[in-house]
């Protein structure tokens, strides 16, 4: 198929074309750039929701039930399940697929897993581009599920319009550190598995952490006077309890983003971040293409202590700039 043909078929939401476009993006095949540029005018309509939280918190189950509610109001839903980079939690993708399998036969739901490539920033770029493909193909809601264990995963979740952080009662201290990172990016909290003991304590815990977090500069810029305070919603995903409240909170957050000055400022900041990271990715890619052979030589020189790493880097940059001019 020709590139223009693929674009038309993606926009028409032909499942095979969408799958093909996602594969292109995932493998960064030649032509990816052109495809994304051609799709860009057709993007910007989807609401992107990042779902993150500790392993096994019930993210996929909750997503499955949220999809049900979005479908009931006629929204098409795209899901990107990001494979955790940690080999410890490998195999989660199968779980994700399984947990959302109730929508497997629904043509209005497109679920796709993305694998970690291991290169810096690679995964967040791939997921951002995959979101664009699902947006262009007319999915009103795009959900990105990541396990909130690494910086990468949290970053991906926070490129979304709204970030839903899922936690569970009774996780204990090991999760406090994890929570601190998650806390910063949460727009909505779901305390899932509220059928278990300790849900009240978990909610109090979160309220406390959020109020303490208020004191930090970062949290201040996010909350005070911003017109948005992070709701904490109790749910039991397996019984579809609290799920409508989660969806409603996410709707309200999207409304806030579109109308409140602080929300608009945040959207603008996200775009700026995207351009920065896109610039970084493209620069590094281009530089590596040009400098590939010289990189080895530089490493040889550093190893033999003929040059220090700082000068070696400056030399490479100078060489790259000369090549470009
Ligand atoms: N008791 C109880 N169990 C739940 C609830 N929600 C999910 N579970 C169970 O928790 C387990 C993990 O659920 P998943 O939805 O796969 O969790 P996840 O966060 O997507 O897991 P990973 O993607 O592997 O990190 C499954 O056995 C679910 O049935 C709940 O509200 N209550
Ligand atoms: Mg999952």
Image (cartoon, grey):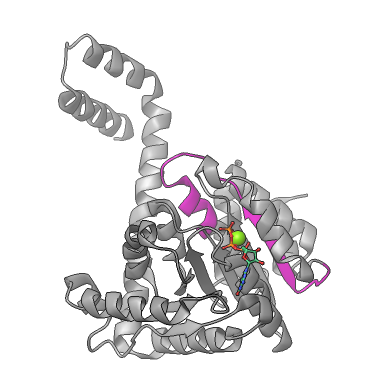
- In the shown orientation, is residue 270 left or right of residue 25? left
Up-down relation of residue 86 to residue 9 (above or below): above
Q: Position of residue 141 (x, y in %)?
A: 60, 76
Residue at the image position 35 percent from the left and 83 percent from the top: 263
Up-down relation of residue 261 to residue 146 (above or below): below
- In the shown orientation, is residue 187 left or right of residue 6? left
Q: Position of residue 155 (x, y in %)?
A: 40, 59
- Which quadrant would residue 293 be assigned to in this image? top left
Residue at the image position 40 percent from the left and 37 percent from the top: 286
Q: Residue furthest right?
A: 105
Q: Which quarter of the rendered image does ligand 1 occupy?
A: bottom right
Q: Residue furthest top?
A: 304
Q: Which residues are magenta?
A: 105-128
- In the shown orientation, is residue 162 left or right of residue 40? left
Numbered circles on residues, count: 0
Viewer-side residue, 201 vs 283:
201
- Which quadrant would residue 162 be assigned to in this image? bottom left
Q: Position of residue 192 (x, y in %)?
A: 53, 75
The answer to whether one can see residue 152 in this image is yes
Up-down relation of residue 9 to residue 32 (above or below): below
Up-down relation of residue 285 to residue 133 (above or below): above
The answer to whether one can see residue 75 in this image is no
**Quarter the C terminus occupies:** top left
Q: Is residue 124 magenta?
A: yes
Residue at the image position 52 percent from the left and 58 percent from the top: 55
Q: Position of residue 214 (x, y in %)?
A: 22, 78
Q: Is residue 226 magenta?
A: no
Residue at the image position 56 percent from the left and 85 percent from the top: 247
């Amino acid at each position: 198929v020709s590139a223009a043909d693929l674009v038309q078929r993606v926009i028409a939401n032909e499942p095979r074309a969408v799958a093909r476009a996602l594969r292109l993006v995932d493998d960064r095949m030649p032509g990816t750039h052109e495809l994304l540029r051609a799709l860009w005018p057709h993007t910007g309509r989807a609401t992107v929701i990042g779902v993150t939280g500790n392993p096994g918190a019930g993210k996929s189950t909750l997503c499955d039930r949220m999809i049900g509610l979005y479908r009931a109001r006629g929204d098409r839903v795209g899901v990107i399940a990001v494979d955790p980079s940690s080999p410890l939690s490998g195999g989660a993708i199968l779980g994700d697929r399984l947990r959302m399998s109730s929508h497997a036969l629904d043509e209005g739901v497109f679920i796709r897993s993305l694998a970690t490539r291991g290169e810096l920033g690679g995964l967040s770029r791939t997921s951002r581009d995959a979101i664009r493909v699902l947006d262009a193909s007319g999915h009103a809601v795009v959900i990105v599920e990541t396990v909130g264990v690494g910086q990468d995963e949290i970053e991906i979740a926070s490129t979304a319009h709204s970030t839903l952080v899922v936690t569970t009662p009774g996780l204990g201290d090991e999760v406090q550190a994890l929570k601190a990172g998650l806390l910063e990016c949460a727009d909505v909290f779901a305390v899932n598995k509220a059928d278990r003991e300790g849900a009240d304590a978990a909610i109090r815990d979160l309220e406390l952490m959020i109020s303490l977090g208020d004191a930090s500069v970062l949290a201040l810029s996010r909350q005070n006077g911003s017109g948005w305070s992070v709701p904490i919603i109790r749910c039991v995903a397996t019984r579809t309890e609290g799920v409508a409240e989660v969806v409603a909170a996410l709707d309200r957050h999207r409304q806030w983003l579109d109308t409140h000055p602080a929300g608009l400022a945040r959207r603008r900041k996200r775009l700026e971040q995207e351009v920065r990271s896109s610039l970084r990715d493209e620069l590094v890619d281009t530089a590596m293409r040009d400098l590939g052979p010289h990189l080895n030589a530089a490493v040889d020189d550093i190893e033999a202590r003929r040059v220090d790493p700082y000068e070696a880097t400056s030399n490479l940059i100078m060489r790259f700039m000369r090549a470009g001019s």
